[in-house]
Image (cartoon, grey):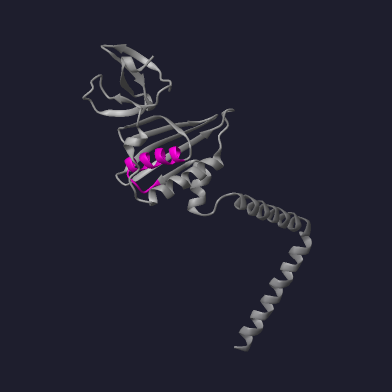
């Protein structure tokens, strides 16, 4: 047993001496290597400090002005329009078809656009864009508006849809009064007319879709 311990100590001393000799002999390379490792470590710290670390932060970092709401798209559409009206905006356009929705509103030189898509019956993905007169986006305002819409949804109330669409022109899916309504236009709003005939005008809607408005209601 003593021989094994002595032998082990002897080899331990040999390897220790070899390590010291290697370090001393290759000190410049070692210093260079340690310096490189230190630089990588520090740059990594700086990089990870700039990148979101939680899933929520990562989503905000990559998506920006897009958020998801655990509510049906009809409820989100109504809450968005209601919140904009409460904030003093004028609703100029509302669209809803094929599980997609759109709300556009203006106030002075500011325009707001909510575009939304139904992911599941109780989950809606919403994109918000707020632009000033110089067309620059206002991301801080978008986040604030998202927060206001979310608080409105939590109230779980009726938003008075008839009051929201009051005095707005209806957009139909076909050139017939009895056909389903797919949107609303405020008086004075502008649209792109694609075709006209039979007392109706065919107008462009979101995502390359179209709807129909009675001829006499558009100038």
Query: What are the residue bounds of the magenta stretch?
Result: 69-86
Q: Is residue 178 left or right of residue 83?
A: left
**Number of marks present in the image shown:** 0
Given the current orientation, which residue lies at the most extreme left position?
Answer: 178
Q: Quadrant of residue 15?
A: bottom right
Is residue 82 a member of the stretch shown in magenta?
A: yes
Q: Is residue 80 above or below residue 154?
A: above
- Magenta-highlighted stretch: main secondary structure? helix
Is residue 163 a member of the stretch shown in magenta?
A: no
Where is residue 69 shown, x and y percent of the image?
Answer: 39, 46
Where is residue 14 shown, x and y percent of the image?
Answer: 71, 73
- Residue toward you, 31 or 22: 31
Which residue is rendered at x = 78% and y = 60% of the image? Answer: 27
Given the current orientation, which residue lies at the most extreme bottom position?
Answer: 2
Q: Quadrant of residue 125?
A: top left
Q: Is residue 25 above or below residue 68?
A: below
Which residue is rendered at x = 31% and y = 26% of the image? Answer: 170
């Amino acid at each position: 047993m003593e021989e094994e311990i002595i032998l082990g100590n002897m080899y331990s001393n040999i390897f220790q001496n070899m390590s010291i000799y290697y370090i001393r002999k290759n000190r410049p390379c070692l210093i260079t290597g340690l310096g490189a490792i230190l630089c990588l470590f520090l740059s990594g710290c700086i990089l990870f400090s700039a990148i979101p670390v939680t899933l929520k932060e990562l989503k905000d970092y990559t998506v920006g002005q897009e958020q998801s709401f655990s509510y049906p798209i009809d409820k989100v559409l109504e809450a968005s329009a209601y919140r904009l009206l409460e904030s003093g905006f004028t609703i100029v356009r509302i669209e809803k078809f094929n599980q997609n929705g759109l709300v556009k509103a203006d106030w002075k030189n500011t325009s707001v656009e909510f575009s939304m898509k139904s992911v599941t019956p109780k989950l809606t993905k919403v994109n918000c864009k707020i632009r000033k007169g110089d067309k620059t986006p206002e991301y801080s305002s978008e986040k604030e508006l998202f927060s206001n819409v979310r608080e409105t949804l939590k109230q779980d109330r009726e938003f008075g849809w008839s009051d929201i669409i009051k005095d707005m022109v209806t957009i139909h899916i076909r050139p017939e009064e009895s056909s389903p309504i797919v949107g609303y236009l405020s008086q004075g709003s502008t649209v792109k007319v694609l075709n006209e005939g039979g007392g109706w005008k065919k107008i462009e809607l979101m995502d390359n879709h179209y709807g129909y408005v009675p001829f006499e209601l558009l100038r």
